[in-house]
Amino acid sequence: MAKQGTSDKQSLRNDLDPDFDLDEYIDDQAYFGQNNSKVTDREFKEERSDLIKHSLLVVAVISTIFLWSFDWSPRNAYNYFFAGESPVFVFEEGGQASTQDFEFSEAPEFNSQQSLSATDYLVELRDKGLLGEGKLSTFDARELYGSDVPISYLVLLNEANFLDNFSFVDITEFYENRVPIEYLESLNRAGYLDQLSFVDITEFYENNVPIQYLNRLNDIGILSKLSFVDITEFYSSQVSIDYLRALENNGFIETLSFVDITEFYENGVTIKFLNDLKSKGLIDELSFVDIVDLYKAEAN
């Protein structure tokens, strides 16, 4: 008696097209099954990738809400968790803190403009001589009103002859970051006001960077080569002016990042060691971590 499997196969052959090849059909089904498995695997990977992206988005949203709730910028959050006390301004190795020509203190409060309508705001600016040619345009004035910049702050800017120096964006940023007019005057006396952006100025003020510190950076010829991030980090990390001068004299200021320089200074990496690495063609091949580790290993 023929086996059931053989009978079924023969019956299938009789029912289908005479040219039907069962073995080829089985191979085709196996190939389809493999491909279908690949598609399923790909879909799984895509779903997993989407899940990761959504998780990261949730974390980002929660972090943003947290920072917003405490009115923190990322920099302020970093300072809260990691930064220490306010730095001491050191000019030279072992030097004393410099006398500042601006005394950092609590910025004055100004009354809100929300009690005035937009038209009343314009009228008051006009009556005080702050609106028109050489002063504020009506567009500037409306933008300042929308940002709740008080007229009393604009009066102080005008008395210091700064009103026509700045755009409404500059003025708004100065006011929102509570930059005192006295700080702007100090920068102006030092000759830096026209050289710095509103971002530079607000960051220097918020980080208590003394005017005299800017003067010393300028004296050694590197002020214009540094960003506000470089300067605030060097100041807050108390990187000495002597060390920065030596780096500049040996051609390292424009080739090293503020992270490199700060780490080298804090770990005592000498200029001689950096020059030795440079002469051996290694300095561009190594990270600051490598250089610090090598220096410590050789110093011991």
Image (cartoon, rainbow, N blue to C red):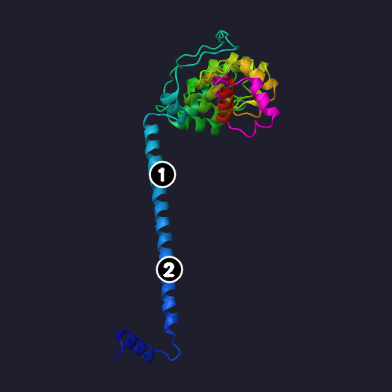
**Residue 58 seen in the current view:** yes
* Residue positioned 47% across, 14% down in the render: 105
* Res 95 → quadrant: top right
Q: CA distance from mark 1 to mark 2?
A: 33 Å
Q: State the image coordinates of residue 187 (x, y, percent, origin top left).
A: 60, 17
Dot 1, how many residues are within 10 Å of its Cα: few (below 14), some (14-19), or many (20+)?
few
The quarter of the picture where the N terminus appears is: bottom left
Give the mark nearest the N terminus, 1 or 2. Answer: 2
Which range is magenta? 261-287
Residue under numbered circle 1: 56
Q: Is 270 part of what is drawn in magenta?
A: yes
Q: Nearer the viewer, residue 64 or 268?
A: 268
The quarter of the picture where the C terminus appears is: top right
* Residue positioned 41% across, 75% down in the render: 29
Which is more foreground, mark 1 or mark 2? Answer: 2
Q: State the image coordinates of residue 17 (x, y, percent, origin top left).
A: 42, 90
Q: Nearer the viewer, residue 183 or 207?
A: 207
Disc 1 residue type (three-letter): Leu
**Residue 258 seen in the current view:** no
Residue under numbered circle 2: 34
- Name the residue at the front extreme: 1
* Res 228 → quadrant: top right
* Res 139 → quadrant: top right
Disc 2 residue type (three-letter): Gln
* Residue positioned 55% across, 19% down in the render: 235
